[in-house]
Image (cartoon, grey):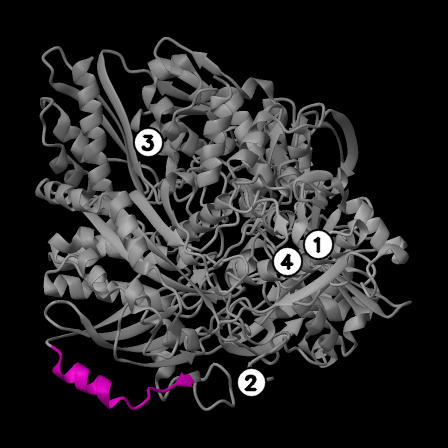
Amino acid sequence: MTVTAGARFVGQRVARREDIRFLTGRGRYVDDIELPRILHVAFARSHVARGRIVTVDTSEAQALPGVKAIYVAGDLASLVHNHTVDDEPHGRDRPFRLFADGDVRYVGEPIAMVVAENRYQAEDAVDAIAIDIASDEPVLDPESALNADAPLVHPGTSSNVYIDIPSVDNPALDEVLASAPVVLTETFRQHRHATVPMETRGILASWDPLRDELTVWISTQGPHGVRAQMARVLGIDDSQVHVIMPDVGGAFGLKMHPRPEELATVVVTKLLGQPVKWIQDRRENLMADEQARHDQATVTMAADEAGTLLGAKVDFLEVGGAFPSPGGSAAVFTTLLFPGPYRLPAFGTSARTVHTNTPGRGAYRGPWMIETVVREQMIDCLAARLGVDPLELRRRNAIREEDLPYTMATGLAYDQMTGYATLEQAAEKIGYEALREQQRAWRADGRLVGIGICLLAEPTAMSFGWMTSDAATVRIAQNGQVTVAHSGASHGQSLETTIAQVVADELGVELDQVRVVQGDTDATPLGAGTGGSRSAVILGGAARGASREVRDRMVAIVAHQLEASPDDLVVGGGRVHVAGTPTRGMTIGEIATQAYTMPAMLPPGAPLGLEAQSRYAPESFCTWSNACHICVCEIDPATGAVEILRYVVSEDCGVMVNPNVVEGQIAGGVVQGIGGVLYEHMPYDDVGNPLATTFVDYLLPTATEVPEIEYGHIETPAPTNPGGHKGLGEGGAIAAPPAIVNAIADALLPLGVKVRSQPLGPADIVALIEAASP
Amino acid sequence: MADVSVRLVVNGEEKQANVEPRRTLADFLREDCRLTGTHLGCEHGVCGACTVLVDGAAVRSCLMFAVQANGAEVTTVEGISRPDGELNRVQEAFREAHGLQCGFCTPGFVVSVTAFLRDHPSPSDQEIKEALSGNLCRCTGYQGIINAVRLAAGANS
Amino acid sequence: MKPSAFAYHAPATIDDAVTLLAELGDGAKVIAGGQSLVPMLSLRLAYFDHLVDIGRIPELRGIRHESDAVVVGATTVDAAIEHDAEIRKRVPLLARATPYIGHFQIRNRGTVGGSIAHADPAAEYPAVALALDAEIEAVSPRGRRRIPAERFFTGFWTTTLEQDELLVGTYFPAWTGRTGFAVREFARRHGDFAIAGAVVGVQLDGDGRIERGAIGLLGLGPTPLRATAAELALVGKKADVATDELGQLAMSDLTEVPSDLHGSAGYRRRVGAAMVTRALDDAISEASSG
């Protein structure tokens, strides 16, 4: 067996290569790119949530200095041949339009597009466009949207419901719910969030009329998808479109699919034959871009007196906004995932998604997370009802090793699941028993301290449709330099380093011998980009596959050269040599030179060169990872302020490529969860005006609002991919909100407060306290 | 509205330009000086991604007009590295502590922290967090950033 | 988010600045640190044809110590207050309020005069000026005048300054004797504008009784406010006065408590009462130990 000399990098806290340029200001993001004759874009947008456009007068704006052109729907919409994205469910059923046309359906909807010499002038022109809209009553909340006599968000449809997953007859479940000793029903509500990467969207599109080619630089998490879509938009071939993903300042799901403004920019560069740049500003990003997490669910859960879960029924209601993004709905996933890492013998569910006169729903880090939020809250409700400690209740029901493989009532199967182990590790790490003891003393002192738990099963690396596979090409040059060109699109996930770690280990070379290339559609294989916690598993699998192929070729060449058996050869230290006799061997550069330039030296029939591409799809539809979060918080009753005293995460993501990266991903997700529950809220007034359109009102947590996160790692290798990895990128954002909400509910338990909705800002908590003790 | 002539020293080099008064210092640095390391995260003075040093003080360059910086010495993230181009102690610490992921907020943090530690070489944890509270990050959850500042401060003592 | 165009003026003297303001009229706006003004311009919530930058007038910057007051020049930056050891001793309330102002980057540019002239009811310096009965000095073509703080703040973002009048400095009285000061404010996050807050000073007599108290309120009306009833109730009391009752009393005669997406009026009163109580506890404790 050929041996590669040790896993030297995978598993290590390797410092990141990409840091050098980011720390010195030499990152290149889309707004940093300049081209000659570039034009800049600004949009005039609707200030009304629902209404009829009476007039749009651009005459004064047209005459302003630097204005090149102003477009409305009628000018551009017909120039879009096909707006769909790869794999779009239901083909063209998704409501779509480039700009508002005749009517408006959410505040912020683009109405007119100004193209000018610079953004200052473009905004002057936007100011000068006179727009008159006759407003109508908007549909703003999901329950109203369901009413038979509700106004229709989209005229011509029969209702505002556009996804309807009805429940299925389930007499066994009905029997359980009718006869179980303990049956609880609760409705939980979650508020509207914005995704808010630190870099807003942006696109620079340049049509070359001499070559009939489009080049696009775009802040994206899926460059190949953009390429295919923009080709369809212009009605040209993929081969005429070159997409380059520069450095991207975060995405979290927002940048998986381009928005109408970006499509319009592509149409306009072709019209004008000049490069056109649109950089979304923060107000547009908050007010008019995809929103998320606006969900509610009614849960019925049944248990016996000992707390064994017997069955559950959940009805989900998801808010989709006016123009949901292609990946916006998570309805299907919520119905499949609700049972989580527990034994739940009977389960039934239904889900609906409704349009509202608000920006469309987009995918945001764990888009289905409402299922975990409501499940974990419900388990705490059950614990309170039964008088059982919430940790103990979870212990009694968590799937254990002896239950595996376990098929959920929804049909998904766990081949491996270590939720129980993470529960125990987290409990130990936080000192759970002593903490509960301490809580009794605090409560006696009148302090409102609570402990909240979330047990999470995360479906990572979901492999279906356009997201089925990833690919990597590994190439070794004559100087021994290794290049990995892959189909991913790292935008903070550290792939430039972690993929190098994997490949360096597979090829037995130094880390700085490996260069990682991504994001350029001319230079990388096709793929869905980065998202869905897929990279370690799927991209890692591809990188390993390509590396192993190249490695095998190297071994074959050296075996042939030295007349040795491949089994006697070792790959390591940048060489391939005879085991025990390091001097009998070749550097990989020497092997490459032969492979490219000396065919006669190669084994008969061996392929020339040292370059291989591997496309990898995991064996299973998803790779399960899991975690347990425990949060301790204290509430100041006078102000309602929540302080997080401790936060522990125990997670199992299989074999970690880089523990720094693992912890960083968890931390980012947890703090998005803290933000979501305690600070972030995207409210609308009763006529559909957004109330939090700047960072003054949409509040992100800062360093003073976050606890020190404590990590416990369990590494149970995944049996279904060559590296034994599991994904984890979304887990923090999914598990943190329920852990925090449960901690708040626990803190307020002595006051008789029931927590059933978010957000839980200080005023919300005071309102709950006051309502419970009038 | 007539252009105004401004002259300032940016990262040790003299820059002169005629600018509209409304041109922000951030845009002047990014576009007129081609120093794109300073980033625009919000353009209303909250996120800190645009932080630069003006006469040594950390400020939000999106909240200044270039004309207000006439005659000033400005240091951007590009000027923060050591003269030999190596990472300064703050930059090194960020790298070691995994204090960045997508990198977009990073220049603002590097500049802010460099100024903070220069003026407060031995900060308490609470002082560190308060000093960091003027810069937003969406990727790291601040854990690596706080550790980076501790590390860089510790390198002092 | 780019501002609309304006003409820029950078006068070198107070007289030049005042003359400009008089000439340019309503379309002109003074800019000092710009930390409040520039975001409004960038968001196009405000438009001005002319900005008069007073940052180049040397006489406007600096701290001067008089026998019973500290005089802070209009364009003195917040950071200068934060680092001034004399101010920490002579006007502790001013020093202690400063770290609550935004973040250090804001404080490097934001000015004391700018904050007072902008008159945000949730800002720290206007409340401190009001609590300490400061006097605001202003210059116009009609001459120089000193305006007592209690007459200065007339409405939301509105002061008695005339359009052609420039705030040049603020006189903060220095308290002597057995004094204690405290700032307590509640904000959503560190550095945010206060939802409600209190800036408090107390002075004890030789018998340990409170002989005067000043309670300035932030975020509880269209202007900074004085909790006069509570101040009167303090007089003559000993250090063990029931500060929670005083906190309630301080809220009782407020008539225009704001209500917005960060909290209703009722919520702000609850928080305000707690802030007054806690600030009084701190201040009285400090005075008692002095």
Same chain assignment for discs 2 and 3: no
A633 sits left or right of C146 in the view: left
Which marked residue is nearer to the observer: mark 1 or mark 3?
1
Alpha carbon separation for disc pair 2 and 3: 67 Å
Residue position for label 1:
A565
Task: Measure how far apart labels 4 and 1 are at the Cα level.
Answer: 26 Å
| Residue C146: image location, x then y, percent | 42, 23
Q: Chain of mark 2?
A: A
Describe the element under mark 3 as helix, strand or loop: helix
N-terminal of the pair, mark 4 or mark 1, is 4
Q: Which label sits on residue C150?
A: 3
Identify whether A235 is placed above or below A561.
below
Q: Residue at x 64, y 61 (%)?
A: A545
Tag 4: Cα neighbours inside 10 Å, few (<14), some, or many (≥20)? many
Q: Secondary structure at mark 4?
A: helix
Q: How many residues crowd around disc 3 within 10 Å: few (fewer than 14), some, or many (20 or more)? A: some
Name the residue that disc number 2 marks. A90
Alpha-carbon span between mark 4 and mark 2: 33 Å
In the rendered image, residue A33, in percent from the top left (x then y), is placed at 74, 50
Quarter of the figure with the C terminus of chain A: bottom left
The residue stretch that appears in magenta? A164-180
